[in-house]
């Protein structure tokens, strides 16, 4: 087996990080994390609809997480970056601190970094 390039090692680390993040958050949504109800009701849905919405979002997050682990593609990573930015912004919009948004920078940065990395071919080490 050939040794991995630094580009490949970075890609694997980011794939694991993005998978862990979206799988974990997806499972919390499926398990109906009660602290997430205000994020659903912020858009006018009732608290009674929140379990359905959280389950749907959770299943999507888990499926996307697994897809990135298997083989990252542009459209799921674009969605994951956008979704992470959106959900981080929900915290202060729902009454939390703006620091709640800042704290989630890695949730946004990891899928974005992987997206940028897979779009750039690895550089040759030969001149």
Image: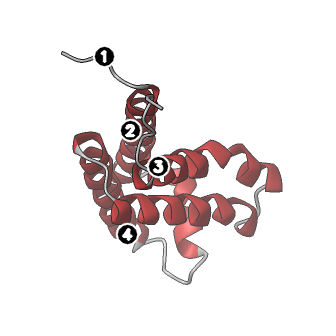
Q: Residue furthest front?
A: 127
Disc 3 from disc 1: Cα separation: 42 Å
Q: Which residue is mark 1?
A: 3
Residue 53, label in figure = 4
- Which mark's residue is nearer the viewer, 2 or 4? 2
Residue at point 22%, 42% (across, down)? 70
Q: Is residue 56 left or right of residue 54?
A: left
Say how many tags the image has: 4
Residue at point 30%, 16% (across, down)? 3
Q: Earlier in the sequence, mark 4 or mark 3?
A: 3
- Which mark's residue is nearer the viewer, 1 or 4? 1
Disc 2 from disc 1: Cα separation: 18 Å
Residue at point 81%, 56% (across, down)? 98
- Which mark's residue is nearer the viewer, 3 or 2? 2
- Nearest the viewer among 99 and 71 is 71
Give SS at disc 3.
loop
Residue 33, label in figure = 3
- Which mark's residue is nearer the viewer, 3 or 1? 1
* Residue density around tag 3, few if under 14, some if 14–19, many if 20 or more, within 10 Å: few
> Is the C-beta separation of discs 4 and 3 under 8 Å?
no
* Residue density around tag 4, few if under 14, some if 14–19, many if 20 or more, within 10 Å: some
Q: Earlier in the sequence, mark 3 or mark 2?
A: 2
Q: Residue furthest right?
A: 98
Give SS at disc 1.
loop
Disc 1 from disc 4: Cα separation: 44 Å
Disc 2 from disc 4: Cα separation: 26 Å
Q: Which residue is mark 2?
A: 15
């Amino acid at each position: 087996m050939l040794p991995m390039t630094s580009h490949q090692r970075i890609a694997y680390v980011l794939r694991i990080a993005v998978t862990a993040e979206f799988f974990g958050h997806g499972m919390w949504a499926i398990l109906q994390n009660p602290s997430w109800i205000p994020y659903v009701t912020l858009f006018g849905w009732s608290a009674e609809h929140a379990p359905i919405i959280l389950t749907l979002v959770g299943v999507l997050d888990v499926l996307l997480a697994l897809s990135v682990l298997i083989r990252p593609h542009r459209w799921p990573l674009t969605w994951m970056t956008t979704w992470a930015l959106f959900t981080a912004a929900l915290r202060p919009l729902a009454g939390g601190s703006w620091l709640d948004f800042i704290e989630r920078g890695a949730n946004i940065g990891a899928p974005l970094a992987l997206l940028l990395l897979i779009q750039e071919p690895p550089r040759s080490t030969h001149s």
